[in-house]
């Protein structure tokens, strides 16, 4: 039975558990290790939390969607929401700051730094009045470490 590659979730923090469960099903067939899965899950949950809190203001009547695209080299998660515009300067600041322990313990911007550490690509753009947030994590190097089991 194929797994749906997209999910719509309410802008409530209670959506994080269903997101994690859905993502686990998306990643189940991939020959990747637990550390790889954890990093992508962490980035996905941090991204969803930012959307829920800051773009959609925890309004459960609002929704955001997540699409999972798997190819031979990577997994891409595309989040879409119609909330407030993402402040590009915050992402630029997170990219320019160091990743020392003090920066990761600071409340402001910590989630963005965790996302940047967990994935290979993190972009946010505004398209036709919607925020499009893209996470990409390469997995082709995992193939040699974890050959397919035939399941």
Image (tube, helix red, strand yellow):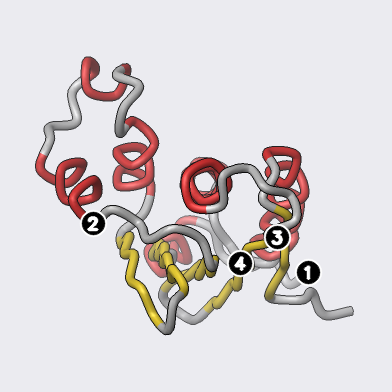
Judge whether 31 appears above or below 76 on screen.
above
Quick one: quadrant of the C terminus? bottom right
Q: Which residue is mark 1?
A: 151
Determine the residue positioned at 63% across, 43% down: 58
Mark earlier in primary sequence (2, 3): 3
Nearer to us of marks 3 and 4 is 4
User: For residue 16, what is the image quadrant?
Assistant: top right
Nearer to us of marks 4 and 1 is 4
Mark earlier in primary sequence (3, 4): 3
| Separation of marks 2 and 4 at Cα, in angstroms | 20 Å
Nearer to us of marks 2 and 3 is 2
| Separation of marks 2 and 3 at Cα, in angstroms | 33 Å
Mark 2 and mark 1 residues within 8 Å of each other at the beta carbon: no
Mark earlier in primary sequence (2, 4): 4
Mark earlier in primary sequence (3, 1): 3
Q: Which residue is mark 3?
A: 28
Mark 2 and mark 4 residues within 8 Å of each other at the beta carbon: no
| Separation of marks 2 and 1 at Cα, in angstroms | 42 Å
Numbered disc 3: secondary structure: loop
Mark earlier in primary sequence (4, 1): 4
Q: Which residue is mark 4?
A: 66
User: For residue 136, what is the image quadrant?
Assistant: bottom left
| Separation of marks 3 and 4 at Cα, in angstroms | 17 Å
| Residue 149 horizontal/vertical position (percent) | 69, 65
């Amino acid at each position: 039975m194929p797994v749906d590659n997209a999910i719509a979730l309410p802008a409530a923090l209670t959506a994080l558990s269903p997101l994690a469960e859905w993502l686990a099903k998306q990643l189940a067939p991939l020959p990747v290790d637990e550390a790889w899965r954890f990093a992508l899950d962490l980035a996905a949950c941090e991204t969803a939390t930012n959307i829920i809190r800051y773009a959609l203001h925890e309004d459960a009547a609002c929704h955001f969607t997540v699409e999972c695209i798997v190819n031979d080299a990577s997994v891409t998660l595309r989040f879409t929401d119609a909330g407030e515009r993402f402040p590009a300067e915050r992402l630029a600041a997170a990219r320019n700051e160091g990743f020392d322990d003090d920066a990761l313990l600071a409340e402001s911007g910590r989630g963005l730094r965790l996302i940047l550490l967990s994935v290979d690509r993190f972009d946010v753009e505004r398209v036709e009045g919607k925020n499009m947030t893209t996470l990409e994590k390469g997995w082709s190097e995992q193939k040699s470490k974890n050959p397919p089991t035939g399941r």
